[in-house]
Amino acid sequence: MNSARLLLVLPCYNEEAILHHTYATLKHYFAGIVGSGLISPDSKICFVNDGSRDRTWEIIEEIAATDPTVIGVKLSRNFGHQSAILAGLEHHVDEYDCFITLDADLQDDIHAMTGMLEKHRDGAMIVYGVRNDRTSDSWFKRVTAESFYTVMQKMGVPVVFNHADFRLMDRRVLRELGNFREINLFLRGIVPLVGFKSEKVFYKRLDRLAGETKYPVRKMMLFAWNGITSFSTFPMRLVLYFGVFNFVVALAIVVYILTSYLFGFTVPGWTSTMLPITFFSGSNMMAIGLIGEYIGKIYEEVKGRPRYIIEKVVHD
C-alpha cells in the first residue's frame, strides 16, 4: 500500500515568537514519519498567515524559500482562525490524500499525529485529537472549556468532548465539507455532521513555549456563543420557556391584585408598580436581543460574502 500524501495545515496569527521553533520541531518530526513509511516524501507543511501584524508572513516566506516541503498561504486580512484553517485545506483539496490541522503554538502534541495516520491507514476517514489531560491549563480555563463542551452537547450540537481543531481528515471528507457553505464557521460542529468512519487519538495538552494565547476569555466566550447560535435553536426555545414562565408569574400577580382588591387590602405604591414593569421589560429586551442575534446571522449568510481571500501563495 502506498504511503499517504499528507498536508499539515497550521493557521498563524502573530506567531513570530514561536514560528522558527515550530518549523524546526515539525521538520524533525516529518523526517521521522517519512523515514518510517507512514507518509509519502512529497507530504508538505502549510503555514496560513491570517492577517498577522508582526513578522509572521516574512518568516513564512523565508522558510518556504529554503524548504520545498513548506507552503505559505497569505490571506488578504484577518478572517479568523476557522477561515484560515479552511483556506489552507480547500486550496489544496485535490493535491493530497489526507489533511491534519494543528495550531502553530504546538500545545497539541504532534506525536499524536502518528496515531492519527495509523488509524487513517486502517480505514478511518476522520481522526479527532482529544485531550485527556489538561493540567497545563489554568483552573478557570479548564472548568470553562469543559463546561463549554457539556453545554454544547446538551443543546444538541455534535461536538466531540475536549476536541478542538486538531484532527485528521481524508480527502473525500474534505470534499464533502466543501458543500457546507456557512459564513459563520464552527468546524468543531460541522466536521462531525459530515459523517464517515471516525476514530479518536488521546493526548496530553502541553504548555505554550512562547508568544501569547490567541483565545483570551472574551474571545473564548464569543467563540462559544458563535458555536451555540450557529448550530442550535435551543436558546430560541429558552425564550419561549421564559415567556411561559413570565405569563405564569403575571397570572399570579393578577390573582394577588384581585384578591387584595376584593378584601380591601389595596394600597397604591411605587414598588408594586415598578417591580412587574422592570421584570417584564427586562425579559422582553433579552428575548428581542436573542432573536436579533439569530436574525443577524441570517443577514450575514444571505449576503454570501467569501469566507476568506487568498492574497499570495509561496513555495519552492
Image (tube, grey):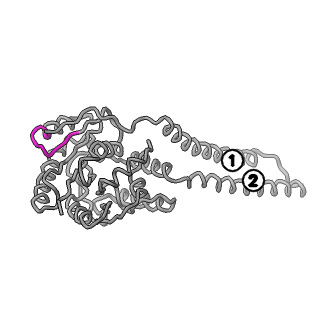
Give how far across and how far down residue 303 sits, in percent.
Answer: 49, 34
Q: Is residue 93 magenta?
A: no
Q: Which residue is mark 2?
A: 250
Q: Which residues are magenta?
A: 63-72
Does 281 sit left or right of 117 as displayed?
Answer: right
Q: Which is more toward the observer, 133 or 298?
A: 298
Q: Residue at x 31, y 66 (%)?
A: 132
Which quadrant of the rendered structure holds the C terminus? top left
Q: Amino acid at mark 2?
A: Ala
Q: Amino acid at mark 1?
A: Phe
Which quadrant of the rendered structure holds the N terminus? bottom left
Snapshot quadrant of residue 77: top left
Q: Eyeballing the image, is 83 above or below 192?
A: above
Q: Residue at x 60, y 54 (%)?
A: 237
Sequence-earlier tag: 1 or 2 = 2
Q: Which residue is mark 1?
A: 280
